[in-house]
Image (tube, coloured by chain):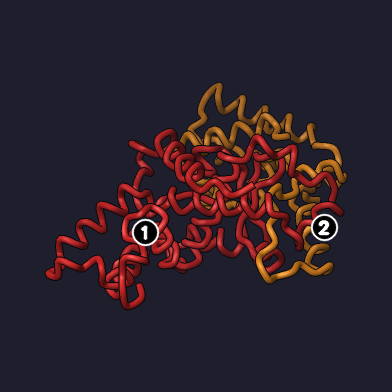
Amino acid sequence: MPANLAAARDAANAFRAKYITGMLFDRFPLDTVFIADNVLRLDLVSFPGLEGLCNSTAYITAGMTEMYLDEALYSAYDSRHYSISKKNRLRFSVAHEIGHLTMHNGIIDRIRCRSIEELKRIANNDDDDRKCIEKEANEFAGRLIAPAEELKRLVDTYGHAQSNPRWRDDGRLRSEFATHCCKTFGLHEDGIRTRLDRDGIWPSDWVSGGG
Amino acid sequence: MSTQFGRLIKDLRIAKGLTLRQCCEQLRFDPSNWSKIERGINPAPKDQKLLTEWAEYLGQQGEALIEFLDLAAISRNEIPADLGSDARIIEALPVFFRAARGVEMDDAKFAQFIDQVRKLHTTDA
């Protein structure tokens, strides 16, 4: 089955409307760890060395009540002297897992592992269905962290400050905007660029000169 | 699988607007241990002074304080069955276990992963 990215974006919008809009934590960058812990009331479990073992920083368990977080990143998240990139990576990973919880709860019985041996078999051999599911969760996470409406508002504000009326054609400006937005949303530059493309706000094929 | 005490401290913590780590920082208590208490894997500590400090921090006074301490005592008699069983571990496995592109998980790493899952769901001695 192909990944339904439009449905993932809609799910992210619905999630935001249901849980975030108008709340005290409705601000940027979005505190996805707080949302998982205090809003969705998931059990967040600090997992030593998770990223080193699995090359991933967060996982939701089959019971959909626990989420494992890489211990080092989870510790850094609350630290006053945190690494911004570490915090942002965890932010996205948690949003990704929330995406699974939101969109894929209904198919758990079909795809869950029923034994450790089965988990081992799929650990290194994702099938097409699982790859699509992962793409949908990524799309959910990106849209949740950097909602289209807010991103568009920022692009419009950025554009008003440009003297060149054809500023949207300039790839260098697009790249500069993406860099500038990282801090606002707590999302990597590549993630910002993906949002600009997927939400049709400032697609890369409009520009010349990279970006 | 959470005990009543585990659920209570989670509810009180969330009502106070605190994440698990924020609460533990204030109480100077290990977050991993607190997590296990909330999830019913570890019982409440025996130290009454510590429990009372927690209760007061979480806003429990009078009758509510007594109930808090009672539930803590009950939890110590409700130590869950061995959580190292395979059925429990299977429930604790990631459901969307994605292989990172181009990065294989070798047998040693996989064994470490499963071992860690077991530890996270096993009562501390």
- What is the drawing colour of chain B? orange
Residue A88's label in the rendered image is: none
Disc 1 secondary structure class = helix
Horizontal relation, residue A6 to residue A160: left or right = right
Q: Amino acid at mark 1?
A: Leu
Q: Which comes before the other along the chain, label 2 or label 1?
A: 2
The outermost residue toward the left is: A163
Q: Residues within 10 Å of mark 1 (few under 14, many from 20)?
A: many
Q: Quadrant of residue A126?
A: bottom right
Q: Is residue A18 above or below residue A87?
A: above
- B110 relative to A57 in the view: left or right: right
Q: Which residue is mark 2?
A: A121
Q: Nearer the viewer, residue B1 or B3?
A: B1
Q: To which quarter of the image does residue A171 belong?
A: bottom left
Residue at 33 percent across and 71 percent down: it is A175
- Is residue B102 visible in this depiction of the protein? yes
Residue A28 in the image: state x and y as whole percent. Answer: 35, 52
The chain containing the residue under callout 1 comes to A
| Mark 2 neighbour density, 10 Å: few (under 14) some (14–19) many (20 or more) | few
Q: Nearer the viewer, mark 2 or mark 1?
A: 1
Q: Say what amino acid the circle numbered 2 marks.
A: Arg
As drawn, is A79 to the left or to the right of B117? left
The residue at 32%/60% (across/down) is A202
Q: Which residue is mark 1?
A: A196
Q: Which chain is red?
A: A
Q: Secondary structure at mark 2?
A: helix
In this rendering, would B41 be left or right of B16?
right
Q: Nearer the viewer, residue A99 or B12?
A: A99
